[in-house]
Image (cartoon, grey):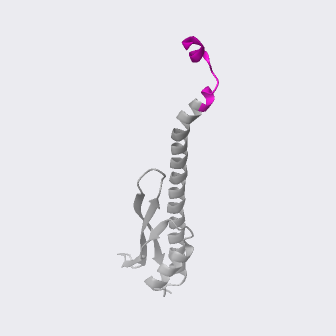
Amino acid sequence: MQKRFFSDKSGASALEFAIVAPVFLLFLFGIFYTAWATYNVTAAKFAIDDTARALQLNQKLTAAELDQIFKSKITTGTMAVQTLELNIEVTQSGFSLAKLRVPISIILQIPFMDELRIDLSASSQTALIST
């Protein structure tokens, strides 16, 4: 009877799938969330670059207006974006350099795991030409 029990192969595929599926799904979710975080970082970088370009074209914009421009360019809801920081420095050669920086937090909620928070910042700098 034991020989017949151990030689029976029916249901072996279902058992193998039940063993492999959780690990496979964990890797799949990990890949998805890594790609999502990378997308958010790239979106923030493009938004800060567009904001720097807007400042270069209209140098009378205030930090609050630049913050509003930046936040209007962000389309994703998983980022917690703080207030944009604007710092204008005059270099030794006499031209002005605007440095924009925004602290960002990306919150990932992976099933069966604690919430993962990634803190980073997007920054850009542009030369301001006096007219």
Report the side of 126 relative to 87 (left or right). right
x then y, percent, for residue 48:
50, 71
Q: Residue furthest front?
A: 1
Q: Nearer the viewer, residue 112 or 40?
A: 112
Residue at 56% over, 35% down: 18
Q: Residue 62 sits in which quadrant?
A: bottom left
x then y, percent, for residue 24:
54, 40
Please report the bounds of the magenta region as a residue range.
Answer: 1-14
Q: Nearer the viewer, residue 21 or 63?
A: 21
Q: Is residue 48 magenta?
A: no
**Can I make out residue 83 in this image?**
yes
In the displayed structure, 95 sits above or below 43; it is below
In the displayed structure, 34 sits above or below 65; it is above
Q: Provide the major secondary structure of the magenta segment.
A: helix
In the displayed structure, 86 sits above or below 25; it is below
Q: Nearer the viewer, residue 116 or 57?
A: 116
Residue at 56% over, 16% down: 6
Locate the N terminus and report the quarter of the image it occupies: top right
Q: Is residue 8 magenta?
A: yes
Q: Nearer the viewer, residue 82 or 131?
A: 82
Residue at 48% over, 66% down: 79
